[in-house]
Amino acid sequence: MIEAGLDALDGPAVILSKEAHTVMTNKLRDATTGIGRDQLPRLWNAYKKVYADCPHWLKAIKHYFD
């Protein structure tokens, strides 16, 4: 996963099982490989695909991409 210049401690959080965390982390890593810091629109699109089944998660992080 790339660093977008955001402090992870400033973002929203959700409690996941270890297995669910691994699944989401792997999906995000795969979806964001090759996307640089200067490509926030591409990064947002990747997050929208990965979190498609969790629209409330997208709503909680959207302001980071505006």
Image (tube, helix red, strand yellow):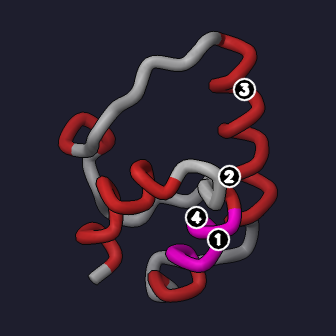
Relative horizontal placement of residue 27, taking residue 15 as reference (left or right): right
Question: Which amino acid type is marked by label 3?
Answer: Thr
Q: Is residue 2 above or below residue 27?
A: below
Q: Residue at x 40, y 28 (%)?
A: 14
The residue labelled by disc 2 is 28
Question: Which amino acid type is marked by label 2?
Answer: Leu
Q: Residue at x 60, y 55 (%)?
A: 51
The residue labelled by disc 4 is 47
Do residues under tags 3 and 4 come within 8 Å of each other at their CB atoms? no
Residue extent of the magenta highlight: 43-49
Using the numbered discs, state the Cα–Cα distance from disc 2 to disc 4 in whole angstroms.
Answer: 7 Å
Q: Earlier in the sequence, mark 3 or mark 1?
A: 3
Do residues under tags 2 and 4 come within 8 Å of each other at their CB atoms? yes
The residue labelled by disc 3 is 22
Q: Earlier in the sequence, mark 3 or mark 4?
A: 3
**Callout 4 secondary element:** helix
Question: Which amino acid type is marked by label 4?
Answer: Tyr
